[in-house]
Image (spheres, rainbow, N blue to C red):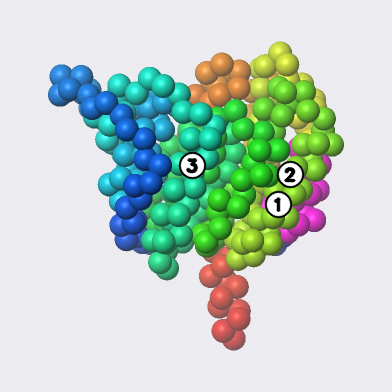
């Protein structure tokens, strides 16, 4: 793919043929325990999905114990394991979980394609059906995360062989009043680490989304996004400019795409995930073209 950035993606493209990956190894160490719900607590609620980080955390551990990843299951899977979860995991517990999921992928990836998403709570709640069944998907996101902490846990991906890595971060840095320089320095280090450790992967930098948060300046977001665009070009990454698709005439996030001014509604996730799917499809097309050229 042309290493220059991709600013706007229009239309929908169908996915290529699907690949069924093998079951993943069973990992028990560090697995937390959770009280089982009674049949009456989960009966009659088909389609009920995790709505808290405590529930999502327990669902993900339940998937690992069964030999798979939550990203390959229905959103309401393993209800008895998480329906009564109340205690939010610590940051260290989240990091341990991400490490176990990465180890499972590294051991069970085989010849299957792998896409990785890295970020904060926005990426954390991406819907499990993002990539359908055509590849493995590893979500390495934690709620409340900033670029500094992401920079220090890139090594969790060691042993994995991603074909694409999607990064979105920065809004928590802004809420925490970190400087633009600090954010951009962290971002550059993240991209350089990923480029060095995973040279086969196509990196996709996603713009920071607009907000309606009183502590976050959308003008500042636009300024940082411009720098991220230039940085992406320098390191040979795709830049996916989502900002104009999520902003209204005032430059704020469109009200129908958010639940609280920062986090996304179902419509917001649907819009975002459609763009990711289109980019992924284009990456695969370019890989096929490149392979055909190399064989000539």
Image coords of residue 10 (percent x, y)? 59, 44
Q: Secondary structure at mark 3?
A: helix
Residue 3 visible at all: yes
Where residue 117 sits, quadrant-wise, is: top right
Image coords of residue 99 (percent x, y)? 49, 47
Where residue 242 sits, quadrant-wise, is: top right
On residue 58, the disc is none
On residue 96, the disc is 3
| Mark nearer the N terminus (2 vs 3) | 3
Question: What is the crowding at mark 2: few (fewer than 14 residues within 10 Å), some, or many (at least 20)?
Answer: many
Residue 5 visible at all: no
Question: Overall secondary structure of the magenta stretch?
Answer: helix
Where residue 34 sits, quadrant-wise, is: top left
Q: CA distance from mark 3 to mark 1?
A: 22 Å
Nearer the observer, 154 or 93: 93
Determine the residue positioned at 73% across, 16% down.
215
Nearer the observer, 36 or 119: 36
């Amino acid at each position: 793919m042309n290493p220059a950035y991709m600013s706007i993606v229009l239309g929908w493209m169908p996915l290529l043929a699907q690949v069924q990956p093998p079951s993943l190894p069973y990992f028990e160490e560090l697995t937390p325990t959770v009280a089982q719900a009674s049949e009456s607590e989960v009966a009659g609620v088909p389609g009920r999905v995790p709505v808290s980080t405590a529930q999502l955390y327990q669902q993900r551990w339940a998937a690992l114990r069964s030999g798979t990843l939550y990203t390959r299951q229905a959103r309401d899977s393993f209800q008895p394991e998480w329906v009564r979860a109340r205690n939010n995991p610590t940051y260290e517990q989240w990091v341990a979980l991400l490490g176990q999921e990465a180890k499972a992928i590294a051991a069970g990836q085989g010849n299957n394609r792998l896409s990785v998403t890295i970020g904060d709570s926005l990426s954390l709640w991406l819907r499990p059906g993002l990539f359908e069944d055509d590849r493995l998907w590893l979500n390495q996101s934690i709620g409340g995360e900033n670029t500094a902490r992401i920079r220090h846990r890139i090594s969790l991906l060691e042993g994995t062989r991603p074909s694409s890595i999607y990064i979105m971060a920065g809004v928590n840095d802004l809420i925490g009043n970190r400087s633009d320089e600090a954010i951009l320095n962290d971002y550059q280090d993240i991209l350089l680490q990923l480029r060095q450790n995973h040279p086969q992967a196509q990196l996709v930098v996603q713009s920071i989304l607009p907000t309606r948060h009183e502590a976050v300046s959308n003008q500042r977001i636009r300024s940082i996004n411009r720098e991220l665009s230039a940085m992406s070009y320098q390191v040979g990454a795709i830049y996916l400019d989502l900002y104009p698709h999520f902003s209204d005439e005032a430059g704020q996030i469109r009200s129908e795409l958010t639940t609280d001014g920062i986090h996304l509604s179902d419509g917001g996730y649907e819009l975002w995930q459609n763009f990711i799917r289109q980019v992924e499809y284009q990456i695969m097309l370019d890989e096929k073209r490149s392979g055909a050229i190399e064989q000539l």
